[in-house]
Amino acid sequence: MKRSLKMYSAVAALPLLVMACGPEEETNQMNEEENHDAENVNANDNGEGSADEVDDLAEEYGISVTVNEEASGDAETASLDELEEVFNLIAAAQETELLQFQDSPDEGEAEQSGEATGAYAIPGAETKTLEIDFAYELDGDLEDETRLPTFADVSDTHAEIAEAGILSWEQSSVDTEMAGAGTIAEFSSEGEWLLMAEYDGVEVEAAEPDQWLAEFSSSVLAGIE
């Protein structure tokens, strides 16, 4: 009989224990949900703040950008200063018609038929250069140092930014003409400056159209100044 009374007492006390624990568990769950909601609100506020920063900066340079507040993780991370450098580069490039030749790894390496690369300064960029690769054929005596060889043909022209990073040049078309009595290959290219970067949790993209000219002299290949 005593055993039955003890069991009854334990069973009778169980609902009281459940009732006592129930409200506390519900309160903890509600607090967790509120904290989670607050974190989401803070994340959204931070994303909106970063997006506004980028939009305002791009507007200063006349650049149209798309800002996604949920980053895909595919883009390289960039600071606001790096984004400004790219915006400045694009804006300056769009104002420039002729790119300035810097150097070539093929200087003094002329062949009757071969390939060459020229590096060109990008306006507004201190460290980045645009590299133009092309195939060529030359006319003239390459041993004659008194006369420059002339371009018989230039083909397979391609331009890209060296060590592109968050900015690249997407070429849509390129035309080549000969100038300077055939001693200069003149490249005319159209395309887009493409930006893709992640800044402070948001993804920034831009596609700005542009066209430019660049020249490559046969004197570079001949090694004649």
Image (cartoon, helix red, strand yellow):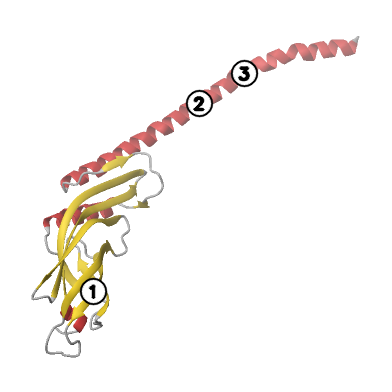
Quarter of the image where one finds residue 9: top right
Label 1 vs 3, first from the N-terminus: 3
Residue contact between numbered discs 2 and 1, judged by CB atoms under 8 Å: no
Going by the numbered disc 1, the residue's amino acid type is: Tyr
Q: Is residue 19 visible?
A: yes
Q: Rounded to the nearest whole Å, what is the CA distance between mark 2 and mark 1?
A: 72 Å
Going by the numbered disc 2, the residue's amino acid type is: Asn
Name the spot of residue 195 as percent of width and height, x first: 28, 51
User: 27 or 44, which is in the foreground?
Assistant: 44
User: Is 103 placed left or right of 199 in the picture?
Assistant: left
Which residue is farthest left? 181
Going by the numbered disc 3, the residue's amino acid type is: Gly
User: Given this view, does label 2 or label 1 mark the residue nearer the observer?
Assistant: 1
* Residue depicted at x 17% and y 53%: 210
- Which numbered marker is on residue 136? 1
Q: Is residue 127 visible?
A: no
Name the spot of residue 23 as percent of width and height, x first: 59, 18
Q: Is residue 130 above or below residue 46?
A: below
Q: Rounded to the nearest whole Å, what is the CA distance between mark 1 and mark 3?
A: 83 Å
Quarter of the image where one finds residue 15: top right
Q: Which residue is mark 3?
A: 22
User: 169 or 46, which is in the foreground?
Assistant: 169
**Mark 3: which secondary structure?**
helix
User: 155 or 60, which is in the foreground?
Assistant: 155
* Residue depicted at x 12% and y 86%: 147
User: Is 219 placed left or right of 26 in the picture?
Assistant: left
Q: Which quadrant is home to the N terminus?
A: top right
Name the spot of residue 8 as percent of width and height, x first: 81, 11
Q: Which residue is mark 2?
A: 31
